[in-house]
Amino acid sequence: MKDALSSLRTESALIHALERAVTKTLSAEELLEQRVSFIDGTLDVDNDLTRAAIQRILVQQTGGAGWAP
């Protein structure tokens, strides 16, 4: 097992993409989409909230701070 793990390598393209992602500043729209996605992913399957409803609630709670609903 130890030998198998020590032979694993991360592709350089992935490393470069991760390095770029660390320094990228998210726009308000991108940040909103990430929040919507996170909340949607943590809700129970039986929950009736749609992504659009989650987005509306987030915008209402933040006063729409530069976000387009």
Image (tube, rainbow, N blue to C red):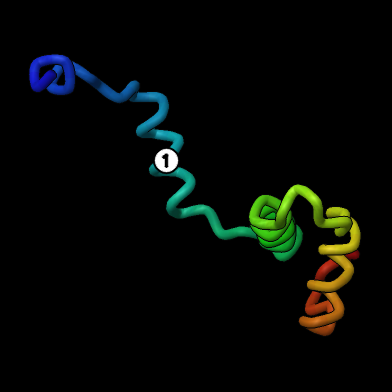
Which is more toward the observer, 65 or 51? 51
* Residue 21 place in picture, x, y as percent: 48, 46
Q: Quadrant of residue 51?
A: bottom right
* Residue 14 place in picture, x, y as percent: 41, 29
Q: Residue at 13% x, 18% y: name it.
A: 1
Q: Residue at 9% x, 22% y: name it.
A: 2
Total numbered badges shown on the rendered structure: 1
37 in relation to 59, above or below: above
Which is more toward the observer, 58 or 30? 58
Q: Quadrant of residue 48?
A: bottom right
Which SS class for mark 1? helix
The residue identified by callout 1 is 18
61 in relation to 10, above or below: below
User: In the displayed image of the protein, which residue is found farthest to the left?
Assistant: 3
50 lies left or right of 58: right
9 lies left or right of 60: left
Q: Residue at 88% x, 54% y: name it.
A: 50
- Kind of residue at badge 1: Leu
13 lies left or right of 54: left
Which is more toward the observer, 23 or 51? 51
* Residue 11 place in picture, x, y as percent: 34, 21
35 lies left or right of 65: left
Q: Quadrant of residue 9?
A: top left
**Label 1, residues with CA under 10 Å away: few <14, some 14-19, many ≥20:** few
